Image (spheres, rainbow, N blue to C red):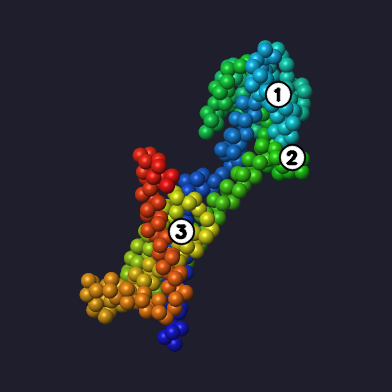
Amino acid sequence: MDIKLIKNKNLVALVICFCITIITANIDMKDFYMNYINADFYKSYELEQVLYEIATQSVYTVVGDNASEKMLDYKAEGRNMISNYTTANVFVINNDSKEVYYNNISDIDKYLKTVTKSYHNVYEINFKDKTMYLLNDNNDKVRVSTNHFGNLAQTKKEDVTTYIAIPFIINIEEMKEINHNEPLYVKYKEFIKNTDAANFFVGCKIIASTIIITYYLSMFILGLSKKDILNKILKNILLISLAFIISLLQSKIYGWSILYYFINTGLLYLIYYFGFKILEENRKNNIHPKDYAHNLIVKLTSLKMNNKKIYTIIKYVWIFIPLTIIQVIIMSTYDYNYGLFEF
């Protein structure tokens, strides 16, 4: 019965450590993920990237024949991009020569009549006047700018007017069968991927937090003393603090990997098992604080003799901590000693 109780307690401790790892994982990316909670694709960074690319390429279409070879290459690339676009509906007017470049409709009046009624957003960008408008069904204009790139009309100075019509989501998704490498489609899929990751990020943390809160409520309902509950809460606060530090260090040095969920859970459990548990035993056995280190060595030696596999795992997992600290110190010298950083 006692052995079963000990196993259950250790299992609960392991679950709590895993929940704490979930809560603190990728915490330095919270601002990025929160931007994608209930995000609107038509106000997203991904769409603005597409608008910037199309606007930039549209200006290159007016490059004169006497331009440098490099600029002529840009002209060919810009015209090719616009003519091959299948998702957004693009129309470019060279206001000097009155030449037009398009991917679908060749007449400006027919173009505006079509896109303002059947597309979600229609932008008019006049580079000479430095104006950027959003058109509605009645061809009324509302002056706008992007959040990340500002007014796209300020990026160039040629006398060019570019119209960019962005279709509804359902139409963007249908474009996979036409051209899955289309910039607008690719950026839309990137947006969906980020929103899914954001929902997973927040959802996992909510579930993990709920499990921990439920754990404490169950102890209160079962009649555990306030002192014992407070001790457990303080222990978990310390574990959460350590998990935050470990998570931030790993993220800055290695990026993030699914493996770190298991690594961090193992580290926290070892801290719990060989830290809190031994401290509690020492306190119950009235062992003097100066003998704590000796008592820990005795227990590790006993573990080495009785279960070499577990001891080996623990030994190499704990090596991860000083290695991480050393790497952080080395990274902090990057600006002062590039040689040390490379080493």
Q: Where residue 10 sits: x, y (%)?
A: 43, 75
Q: What SS does tag 1 mark?
A: helix
Q: Residue at x 77, y 40 (%)?
A: 178
**Picture quadrant of residue 110:** top right
Q: Residue at x 47, y 46 (%)?
A: 31
Query: Split into 4 quadrants, where in the image is the N terminus?
Result: bottom left
Type of residue at label 2? Answer: Asn
Q: Where residue 342 sits: x, y (%)?
A: 43, 44
Q: Does the rendering let one see residue 158?
A: yes
- Left or right: residue 155 versus residue 84 is left
Type of residue at label 3? Answer: Ile
Depth order, front residue of 200/241: 241
Please give the residue where the numbered disc 1 appears in the rendered image.
76
Please give the residue where the numbered disc 2 appears in the rendered image.
179
Q: Which mark is residue 23?
A: 3
Q: Where residue 146 sits: x, y (%)?
A: 55, 31
Type of residue at label 1? Answer: Ala
- Left or right: residue 251 versus residue 76 is left
Q: Residue at x 65, y 15 (%)?
A: 67
